[in-house]
Image (cartoon, helix red, strand yellow):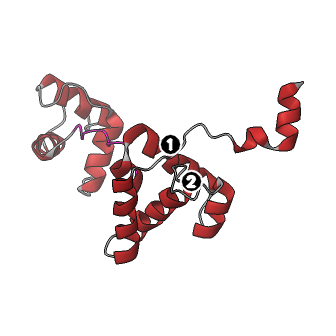
């Protein structure tokens, strides 16, 4: 019952899970970034966001909706930057979030050379031509790669404009 009445009055909506509280050094650093304008636009916007969201003694403590409207960004962006500041620190909050690393290539240049050499060689006995699966199996037999999919073989051959037909 108490919770419902607090929600109706908007008190629970203003509670934030990640509260930004800047030190004096962080605040002066961010103000310097904003005033000089020598860094990227994204970094400046995130600096402005943190200054507006600061709940410290000298902070402005704007609500997320107002920050999003003033800086022309989404409310979720404001929430994510605040979260990154609390969990990872100032530098992480100012930079773009690191993207997931892509998976390493299975066929590097040397492996592709072996693949092309195999595709250009005569097919195995009893076969009229090489298939993608046969080429993949042959690369594993020759210990060129530990494991490779026929689709990877197809993409590598397509990249070199080599046709099996």
Query: Any magenta on residue 145?
Result: no
Q: Tag on residue 78?
A: 2
Q: Which residues are magenta?
A: 96-106
Q: Tag on residue 140?
A: none
Q: State the image coordinates of residue 153 (x, y, percent, origin top left).
A: 28, 40
Q: CA distance from mark 1 to mark 2?
A: 9 Å
- Mainly helix, strand or loop, the magenta region? loop
For the point 19% across and 35% down, which residue is it? 123
Give residue 15's quadrant in the image: top right
Along the viewing direction, whichever of 103 and 107 lies nearer the viewer: 103
Specify whether 77 is left or right of 34.
right
Q: State the image coordinates of residue 83 (x, y, percent, origin top left).
A: 50, 42
Specify whether 104 is left or right of 66.
left
Q: State the image coordinates of residue 107 (x, y, percent, origin top left).
A: 20, 40
For the point 88% across and 40% down, which residue is it? 8
Residue 30 in view:
yes
Dot 2: few (<14), some (14–19), or many (≥20) neighbours within 10 Å? Answer: many
Dot 1: few (<14), some (14–19), or many (≥20) neighbours within 10 Å? Answer: some
Give residue 60's quadrant in the image: bottom right
Depicted 37 relative to depicted 7: above or below: below
Earlier in the chain: of badge 1 and badge 2, it is 2
Specify whether 3 is left or right of 42.
right
Label count reads 2
Tell me the element at label 2. Answer: helix
Along the viewing direction, whichever of 42 and 163 lies nearer the viewer: 42
Q: Which residue is mark 1?
A: 83
Q: Quadrant of the N terminus?
A: top right
Along the viewing direction, whichever of 81 and 51 lies nearer the viewer: 51
Depicted 52 relative to depicted 34: above or below: above
Along the viewing direction, whichever of 107 and 79 lies nearer the viewer: 79
Residue 125 in view:
no
């Amino acid at each position: 019952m108490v919770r419902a009445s607090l929600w109706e009055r908007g008190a629970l909506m203003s509670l934030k899970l990640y509260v930004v509280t800047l030190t004096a050094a962080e605040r002066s650093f961010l103000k310097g970034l904003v005033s000089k304008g020598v860094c990227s636009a994204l970094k400046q916007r995130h600096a402005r966001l943190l200054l507006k969201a600061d709940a410290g003694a000298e902070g402005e403590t704007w609500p997320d909706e107002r920050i999003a409207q003033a800086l022309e960004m989404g409310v979720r962006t404001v929430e994510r930057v605040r979260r990154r500041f609390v969990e990872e620190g100032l530098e992480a909050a100012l930079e773009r979030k690191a993207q997931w690393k892509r998976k390493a290539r299975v066929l590097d240049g040397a492996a592709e050379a072996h693949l092309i050499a195999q595709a250009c060689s005569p097919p195995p006995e009893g076969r009229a031509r090489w298939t993608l699966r046969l080429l993949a199996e042959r690369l594993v037999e020759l210990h060129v790669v530990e494991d490779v999919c026929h689709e990877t073989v197809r993409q590598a051959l397509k990249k070199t404009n080599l046709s099996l037909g």
